[in-house]
Image (tube, rainbow, N blue to C red):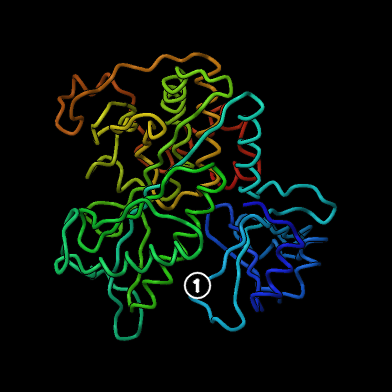
């Protein structure tokens, strides 16, 4: 729904809104915010709210550190866990310099630019997110432990699945915020859970990922638990994946572009890995427990980098399985759009389909497939040598991730 500045100000008056959280994220995808009083909304929309960029990871040093936050009215939502009297609302923001220039490390604007590029070329992308996380108990001091909340396994039921009520509360909270989760269930690991979103436009999908992290951590904390989104919280147990579902539609109605889009993502997968798996812990996950190791694709085969789920019509999509929750979703979606456009523009053919289990294949078979980077340093090297990455990732962000 489209809102104007006047709509937001009127809403704040009518709904007893006292505090407005202006949300953004650093280059690593960690959400930040500034809280302003509702009577500052006029200034926020008209001029922006000042931010000390030197205090945010990756935003720069003390020189030229003044930045401004500009709220996106369309992202307005009430935070349901805050008081009913004196409500708190949240809006995501774009970031600029005081002279109005876009800030290079504003990754939300990076994604906006990718969407605009795709639309100018006649294509619209859609994304859906599948996020996994562990629920751990707290110790007597309220600090997180590595003791899982339960010992249940994949899609178990209560009482073995103790996370059922937590997921229910998370989904109902998201629904109150205007976000509709598609499904939720217990994952393979002890205390591990998954919540999936239906597809939406790229910016909304990325905003929803950021919101999910906030809601999950808030609900877990209210229940005396800790939510862990790290790629590999427990050794010898399944890691947390961020499976990204992507589809594309052509304005001219062409229905044969999905294979080209998938081929583009596969072609650039190794170069993108430093941004899809940006922590050392990410590489403890890849290559085990259904996390991919090779650049491959197939239908209904979870050992692949890209899986084509069983779906028809508007639900037809490709699922990228390498990313993990430490990723900045704005960067990930932007790179996938540019890679997809590369595949479409060049009519790239899909590589040989791998309709077999790569985890149990012999060395001769595996030697035919390109391997994903096995460490963060290797991933950085691949990104540093990529003209594709340098073309689409601003220099400041590139240096932060790769140098």
On the question of residue 56 being in view, the answer is yes
Neighbor class of circle 1 (other Cα within 10 Å; few <14, some 14-19, many 20+) is some
Q: Position of residue 137 (x, y in %)?
A: 27, 74
Q: Position of residue 211 (x, y in %)?
A: 49, 60
Q: Residue at x 37, y 48 (%)?
A: 130
Most extreme residue toward the front, as rendered? Answer: 14
Most extreme residue toward the right, as rendered? Answer: 99
> Can you identify the residue that label 1 sits on?
80
On the question of residue 281 being in view, the answer is no
Towards the viewer: 186 or 2: 2
Q: Position of residue 89 (x, y in %)?
A: 60, 69
Say which element carries label 1.
loop
Q: Position of residue 362 (x, y in %)?
A: 15, 25
Q: Is residue 168 left or right of residue 89?
A: left
Residue 368 image-quadrant placement: top left
Residue 215 image-quadrant placement: bottom left
């Amino acid at each position: 729904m489209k809102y104007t500045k006047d709509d937001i100000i009127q809403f704040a008056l009518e709904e007893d809104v006292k505090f407005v959280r202006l949300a953004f994220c650093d280059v690593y995808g960690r959400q930040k915010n500034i809280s302003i009083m509702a009577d500052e909304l006029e200034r926020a929309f008209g001029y922006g709210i000042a931010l000390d960029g030197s205090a945010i990871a990756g935003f720069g040093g003390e020189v030229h550190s003044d930045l401004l936050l500009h709220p996106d009215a369309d992202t307005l939502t009430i935070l349901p866990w805050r008081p009913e009297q004196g409500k708190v609302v949240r809006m995501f923001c774009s970031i600029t310099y005081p002279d109005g220039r876009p800030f290079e490390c504003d990754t939300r604007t990076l994604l906006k630019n990718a969407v605009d590029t795709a639309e100018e070329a006649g294509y619209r992308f859609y994304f859906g997110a599948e996020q996994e996380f562990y629920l751990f108990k707290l110790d007597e001091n309220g600090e997180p432990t590595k003791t899982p909340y339960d010992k249940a396994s994949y899609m178990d039921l209560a009482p073995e699945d103790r996370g059922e009520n937590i997921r229910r509360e998370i989904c109902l909270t998201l629904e109150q915020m205007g976000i509709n989760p598609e499904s939720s269930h217990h994952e393979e690991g002890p205390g591990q859970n998954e919540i999936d979103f239906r597809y939406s436009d790229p910016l909304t999908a990325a905003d929803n990922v950021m919101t999910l992290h906030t809601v999950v951590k808030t609900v877990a904390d209210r229940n005396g638990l800790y939510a862990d989104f790290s790629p590999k919280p427990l050794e010898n147990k399944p890691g947390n994946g961020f499976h990204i579902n992507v589809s594309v539609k052509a304005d001219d109605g062409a229905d044969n572009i999905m294979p080209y889009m998938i081929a583009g993502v596969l072609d650039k997968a190794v170069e993108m890995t430093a941004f899809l798996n940006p922590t050392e812990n990410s590489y403890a996950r890849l290559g085990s427990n259904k996390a991919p190791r090779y650049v491959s694709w197939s239908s209904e085969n979870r050992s692949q980098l890209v899986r084509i789920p069983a779906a028809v019509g508007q639900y037809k999509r490709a699922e990228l399985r390498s990313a993990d929750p430490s990723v900045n979703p704005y960067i990930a979606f932007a790179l996938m759009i540019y890679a997809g456009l590369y595949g479409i523009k060049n009519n790239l053919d899909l590589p040989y389909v791998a309709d077999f289990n790569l985890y149990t294949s012999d060395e001769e078979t595996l030697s035919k497939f390109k391997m994903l980077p096995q460490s963060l340093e290797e991933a950085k090297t691949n990104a540093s040598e990529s003209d594709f990455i340098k073309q689409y990732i601003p220099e400041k962000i590139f240096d932060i991730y790769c140098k």
